Image (cartoon, rainbow, N blue to C red):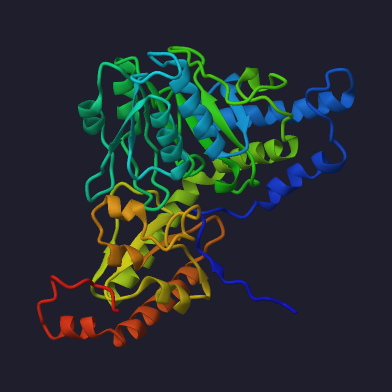
């Protein structure tokens, strides 16, 4: 029995593995299967060579030295290692005491940043959670206003995973360096799509993940600056001392090789892809906004990644909208939280009301998205919204000019 899969427009959640990445990985399953820690024979040497090549490919993509790349299982682990590792290394007081240091982040960060910060609060650190404005941005000025004498760490994502909005990362990093504060950015959505140079962008710690850039799942990396300033971390797990002692455990050689190849391919194609996807995203938004009233593109429209759009549809119930467009795989928010019945906490952070947040779609395009697919998706979404609004008495009142400003948008 064959199953027809929906059109995939959820690349911010995960990307398909590029066939060239799969091809690069294949020998490391069955032929070059050695442990890179085995230094006494050719199997280990061959595996170590694959790891070293990948380390260089990743470093080249982000403007780092290969010795500054630490392999992890993905951005969640990288974020935990960066945030907890830096906090505990630079703490002002010993474990078990309060007032151990001050950390700055934002309320609409990914859960993989927010939850480690909440854990550190329980461990005696103070955390400031900055609120963005309606544009969803975190600026240097916001960080400067929040800095304290005891601030030890700032962690702000480069590009938001639900909105695609781009924060002032180089400017924030410059500020942190001037104050001798460690700066970490979760660059999961950014790396591979936009040019990156961790040195000139003033970054101390950077998290990335393979499956967001056409590589395999279960592998990622953390950039750790080695000089000017040298960043030190407290390891989260002990063992064989791999990865310069930052992350013990046998390396996932196959995944690492795939991650390296994915980074190499992104370096070659991202400039052209960025421009191509910008055209597609603008066309999608234009078609929807020209055909429907009471729609809202969320976040700063002039500071976004080109492959992500987040659109709210007034007078539509979100779950019904998702059911009406089953032919298209899109998201109502982050893949890590979309199973929740709660409206997106990211949209709520921007001041979007619950009902409107419930009726929002995150549409994210990728390497093989075509104009024909975008036209099809726009038509299906427009058709679905119109049909659902035909069932909404509030939309009828809106069309009749009745003041419904004190009534929620979604139909009940």
- Towards the viewer: 224 or 112: 112
Q: Is residue 43 above or below residue 405?
A: above
In the picture as drawn, the residue positioned furthest to the front comes out as 96
Q: Is 72 or 311 nearer to us in this picture? A: 72
Report the front residue among 296 and 75: 75
Apparent side of residue 192 relative to residue 210 in the rendered image (left or right)? left
Farthest residue in the right direction?
Answer: 41
> Taking 221 as reference, is 239 above or below it?
above
Q: Residue at x 68, y 41 (%)?
A: 258
Which residue does the image show at 10% across and 82% down from the upper left? 401
Point out residue 235 in the picture as x, y percentages from the top left corner. 57, 22
Residue in the image at 30% along x and 82% along y:
389
Instruction: Return the x and y of residue 216 as percentages of the image width and height.
Output: 65, 46
Query: Residue 300: in sight, yes or no?
Result: no
Against 387, is 108 above or below? above
Q: Residue 267's quadrant in the figure?
A: top right
On the image, the x and y values in percent for residue 171 come to 30, 28
């Amino acid at each position: 029995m064959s199953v027809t899969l929906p059109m995939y427009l959820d690349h911010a959640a995960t990307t398909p593995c590029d066939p060239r990445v799969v091809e690069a990985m294949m020998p490391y399953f069955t032929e070059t299967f050695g442990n890179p820690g085995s230094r006494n024979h050719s199997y280990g040497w061959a595996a170590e060579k694959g790891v070293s090549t990948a380390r260089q490919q990743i470093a080249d993509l982000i403007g780092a030295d290969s010795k500054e790349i630490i392999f992890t299982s993905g951005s969640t682990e990288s974020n935990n290692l960066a945030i907890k590792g830096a906090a505990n290394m630079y703490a002002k007081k010993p474990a078990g005491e309060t007032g151990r240091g001050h950390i700055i982040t934002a309320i609409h960060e990914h859960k993989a940043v927010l939850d480690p910060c909440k854990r550190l609060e329980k461990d005696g650190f103070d955390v400031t959670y900055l609120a963005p404005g309606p544009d969803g941005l975190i600026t240097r000025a916001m960080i400067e206003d929040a800095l304290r004498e005891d601030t030890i760490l700032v962690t702000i994502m480069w590009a938001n995973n639900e909105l695609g909005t781009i924060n002032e990362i180089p400017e924030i990093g410059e500020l942190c360096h001037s104050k001798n504060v460690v700066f970490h950015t979760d660059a999961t959505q950014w790396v591979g799509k936009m040019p990156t140079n961790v040195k000139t962008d003033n970054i101390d710690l950077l998290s990335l993940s393979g499956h967001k850039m056409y590589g395999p799942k279960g592998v990622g990396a953390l950039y750790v600056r080695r000089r000017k300033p040298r960043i030190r971390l407290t390891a989260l797990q002990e063992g064989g001392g791999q990865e310069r002692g930052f992350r013990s455990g046998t390396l996932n050689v196959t995944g690492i090789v795939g991650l390296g190849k994915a980074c190499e391919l992104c370096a070659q194609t991202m400039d052209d892809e960025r421009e191509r996807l910008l055209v597609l995203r603008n066309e999608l938004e234009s078609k929807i906004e020209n055909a429907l009233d009471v729609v809202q593109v969320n976040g700063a429209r002039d500071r976004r990644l080109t492959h992500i759009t987040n659109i709210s549809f007034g007078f539509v119930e979100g779950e019904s909208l998702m059911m009406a467009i089953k032919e298209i795989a899109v998201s109502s928010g982050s893949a890590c939280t979309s199973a929740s019945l709660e409206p997106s906490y990211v949209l709520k952070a921007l001041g979007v009301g619950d009902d409107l947040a419930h009726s929002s779609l995150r549409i994210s395009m990728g390497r093989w998205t075509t104009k024909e697919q975008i036209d099809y998706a726009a038509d299906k979404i427009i058709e679905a919204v119109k049909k659902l609004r035909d069932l909404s008495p509030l939309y009828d009142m809106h069309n009749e000019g009745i003041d419904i400003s004190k009534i929620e948008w979604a139909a009940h």
